[in-house]
């Protein structure tokens, strides 16, 4: 699509909902806007879409200025190349799946709109359901129609407002997989508003954490989740590091797969991971044990050598950031452990991680995706453009 597409946003207002946020998102990136209910996430999306006029803002997408309050510019929603996917789908219940997508294709000839709608419905795996009315589709199918309709507008940016909140966990996992595969093909900025950290871990390339309308942390997901100074417990979350990796080998006889990431190598349960596949890993901080000497005779497979780079106390827990190669790994330990091991920045340590403690997300050998379960969903193989 547009490799040069970039969204830059600055929104600042004190009423009716406080917002003090600056962000940017590039082509092929997914910026997860994460925070509790009432923190201003949806209002931020409404500003970008032109549905809310903030007191002070500048919004530029793909070189087009959509909002500039200082210059008196406010492009109306219908003239912004925005794809919107809402929590409640917002489909026309009396129209078919095809009809809903055709409604987004403007004044093109009917036959052209019909063909284009069918191509997008095929891209989201709704072949054969084109003529089914929206009201007769399942929740996951309606969400796919909403996604096809949003993308059929040929948007410069895709805005996703809690898009998985109305579906159960199994369907959510499939939709995660499909959206991740699709975003690698359409190459536009995507903003994902969510209060579910599972959405963030699975889909985000970058994260913006907001509270009460203010940005409290932002950055690439690997950097942000490995910071020791962010109080994830405030969001009822356990701290944990997220990395992207690649499958190097599989040892079926042992039931293991070997992965490489920026910090070196990791051994995880095989679970049908495809050799050469790119996967996402999450390592919970409470599953990482630190040692000052390399241990022997243990059942675990992963012993990573690194150095302490930061330590932050959060209540009774100390989060220790360990530099392992180019990666940063978090370990949650007690104050006693910090004292006994004399942990301090610069201290060499070994990080011990059980293979079963590592969550893996990505394509498996059967051609679908893996999250430690058996649900599968094939990758997209065509670009409907």
Image: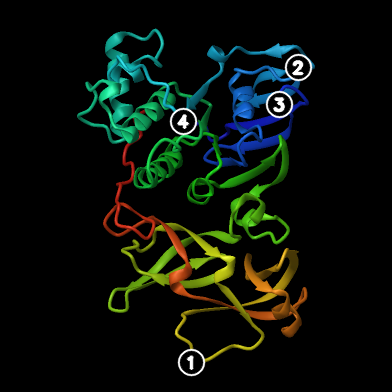
Are circles 4 and 2 on residues that touch, CB within 8 Å?
A: no
* Residue at the limit of the structure toward the left, as seen here: 128
Residue 297's tag is 1
Distance from disc 2 to disc 3, alpha carbons, whole Å, reads 17 Å
Residue nearer the viewer, 186 or 84: 84
| Residue 97 appears in the figure | no
Q: How is the image coloured?
A: rainbow
Dot 2 corresponds to which residue?
Answer: 69
Dot 4 corresponds to which residue?
Answer: 87
Q: Left of 179 or right of it: where is 378?
A: left
Between circles 1 and 4, the one closer to the viewer is 4
Q: Left of 201 or right of it: where is 363?
A: left
Mark 3 packing: few (<14 Cα in 10 Å), some, or many (20+)?
some
Marks 2 and 3, the one that precedes in the sequence: 3
Distance from disc 1 to disc 4, alpha carbons, whole Å, reads 51 Å
The image quadrant that residue 60 belongs to is top right
**Element marked by disc 3:** loop
- Write the residue at 45% across / 23% down: 154
Marks 1 and 2, the one that precedes in the sequence: 2
Are circles 3 and 4 on residues that touch, CB within 8 Å?
A: no
Distance from disc 4 to disc 2, alpha carbons, whole Å, reads 29 Å
Distance from disc 1 to disc 3, alpha carbons, whole Å, reads 57 Å
**Element marked by disc 2:** loop
**Element marked by disc 1:** loop
**Element marked by disc 4:** loop
Distance from disc 1 to disc 2, alpha carbons, whole Å, reads 65 Å
- Write the residue at 58% across / 61% down: 240
Placement of 96 over or under 225, stated as above or below: above
Between circles 2 and 3, the one closer to the viewer is 3
Between circles 4 and 2, the one closer to the viewer is 4
Residue 17's tag is 3
């Amino acid at each position: 699509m547009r490799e040069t597409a970039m969204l830059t946003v600055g929104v600042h207002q004190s009423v009716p909902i406080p917002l003090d946020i600056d962000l940017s998102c590039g082509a092929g990136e997914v910026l997860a806007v994460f925070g509790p209910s009432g923190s201003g996430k949806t209002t931020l999306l409404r500003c970008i879409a032109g549905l809310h006029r903030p007191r002070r803002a500048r919004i530029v997408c793909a070189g087009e200025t959509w909002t500039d309050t200082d210059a008196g510019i406010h492009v109306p929603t219908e003239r912004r190349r925005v794809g919107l996917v809402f929590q409640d789908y917002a489909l026309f219940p009396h129209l078919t799946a095809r009809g809903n997508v055709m409604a987004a294709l403007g004044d093109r000839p009917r036959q052209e709109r019909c063909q284009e709608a069918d191509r997008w419905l095929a891209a989201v795996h709704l072949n054969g359901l084109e003529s089914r009315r929206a009201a007769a589709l399942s929740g996951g199918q309606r969400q796919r129609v909403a996604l096809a309709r949003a993308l059929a507008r040929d948007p410069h940016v895709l805005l996703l407002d809690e898009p998985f909140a109305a579906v159960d966990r199994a369907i959510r996992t499939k939709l995660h997989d499909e959206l991740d595969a699709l975003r690698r093909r359409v190459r536009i900025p995507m903003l994902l508003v969510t209060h579910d950290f599972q959405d963030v871990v699975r889909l985000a390339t970058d994260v913006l954490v907001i509270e009460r309308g203010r940005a409290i942390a932002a950055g690439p997901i690997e950097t942000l989740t490995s910071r020791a100074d962010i109080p994830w417990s405030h969001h009822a979350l356990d701290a944990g590091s997220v990395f992207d990796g690649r499958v190097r080998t599989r040892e079926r006889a042992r039931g293991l797969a070997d992965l490489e990431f920026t910090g070196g190598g990791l051994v995880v349960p095989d679970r049908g991971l495809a050799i050469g596949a790119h996967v996402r890993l999450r390592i919970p901080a409470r599953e990482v044990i630190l040692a000052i000497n390399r241990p022997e005779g243990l059942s675990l497979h992963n012993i990573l050598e690194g150095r302490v780079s930061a330590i932050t106390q959060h209540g009774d827990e100390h989060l220790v950031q360990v530099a392992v190669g180019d990666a940063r790994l978090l370990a949650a330990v007690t104050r006693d452990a910090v004292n006994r091991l004399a942990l301090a920045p610069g201290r060499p340590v070994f990080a011990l991680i059980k293979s079963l403690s590592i969550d893996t997300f990505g394509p498996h050998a059967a051609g679908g995706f893996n999250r430690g379960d058996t649900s599968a969903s094939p990758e997209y193989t065509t670009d409907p453009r």
